[in-house]
Image (tube, grey):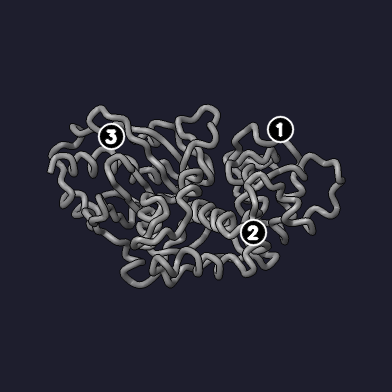
Amino acid sequence: MKRIAAALMALCLSATAMAETTLDDVAARLKKGEYKGVTGALVSVGGKLVLDVPDAAALAGSRQDIRSATKSITAILVGELIEDGSLKSVKTPVSKLLPDLYKGMDKADPRREITVEDLLTMRSGLACNDWVPASLGNEERMYGTSDWSAFVVGLPRAYERGKHFSYCTGGAVLLGRVIDALSGSDVPTFADERLFHPLGIRNAKWEGTPEGHTDTGGHLRLEIGALLKIGQLVHAGGVWEGKQLIAADWIKAMTGFQTRIFDRRETYGYLWWRNEGRVKDKPVSITYAHGNGGNFIIIVPEIDLVAAFTGRNYNKPEQFTPMRMLGEEIIPALLNE
């Protein structure tokens, strides 16, 4: 999927923009469908829900396909492997964890040196770019194969490993195989035990891959309330209801700066996006998970805000409407209260 330029992503927050708008106004517009393609919005400040417009699917007990926001949840699960000690380091080569996938590859092939961290930061060096339809590793090509993991491992190199950001869904799928191999179970079971059930999330639905594993690069289905809970967990440094559910060090590394993106304002952590904005002329940091269509988990720690949005603006600039809403309407309304 082609990314939209920085103008939509900057989230330059202003206390004066849309100064007359209230949160009730935003809620009313959402319910009327005036934000075309935005199907739901939940916003909490200091843990208190200040905007509550769940999407119709959630009200009916259905779940939203959160697309690539799935990747950010995959990153949390990789952290649990580190916590268990089954993954000693993100510097571990994937070939050592999944030897069967590499058994036909020459021992001196540099692709054997691709690490877990390279996949988490989209710096594998493989010829895989989902933003370029002609890329050999584009996700649409992967979806047409019978073995997604073998497809990714077999891609040629395009860059030096660890040096160049290239958005590659296949790399996140390969991380799912790592989770399967090291967790002693499968991704859905591991996610339920370590993340979803402790958060009170009972109806997550993962999609499978043709070779019988889990699509950890996209298409996880969750209710919007689950997205908010995950955002609140990350914002709290991995703490949930007084318990350290996810290691604080992992949350810090996952959401911290890991790599730059050429010609983009955004930076990247471990499968989480990062950006910056301003509130009353004070700089703020923004951490978020993003899925095609307008599915977001957004955290603005300096103002104690967590937001979740669902949408259906697939492959359109309008998928970033929640960012505009947050920067131009929701946060100014909060500041004006």
Question: In the displayed structure, would residue 153 be above or below residue 282?
Answer: below
Which residue is found at the position 74% from the left and 45% from the top? 155
* Position of the C terminus by quadrant: top left
The amino acid type, in three-letter code, at marker 3 is Leu
In contact (CB < 8 Å): disc 2 and disc 3: no
Q: Quadrant of residue 224?
A: bottom left
Q: Quadrant of residue 21?
A: top left
User: What residue sits right under mark 3 in the picture?
Assistant: 13
Mark 2 or mark 3: whose residue is earlier in sequence = 3
Observer able to see residue 311: no
The amino acid type, in three-letter code, at marker 2 is Ser
Q: Estimate the x, y position of residue 225 in percent, counting from the top left.
A: 34, 62
Left or right of 120, for residue 310: left
Of helix, strand and loop, which one carries label 2? loop
Q: Estimate the x, y position of residue 76 in percent, counting from the top left.
A: 51, 54
Observer able to see residue 61: yes
User: What residue sits right under mark 2 in the picture?
Assistant: 86
Seen from the viewer's position, the closer of residues 16 and 183 is: 183
Question: Gap between marks 1 and 3, in whole Å?
Answer: 37 Å
Instruction: Bin the neighbour count of mark 3 within 10 Å (Cα to Cα): few under 14, some 14-19, many 20 and up.
Output: many
User: What residue sits right under mark 1 in the picture?
Assistant: 160
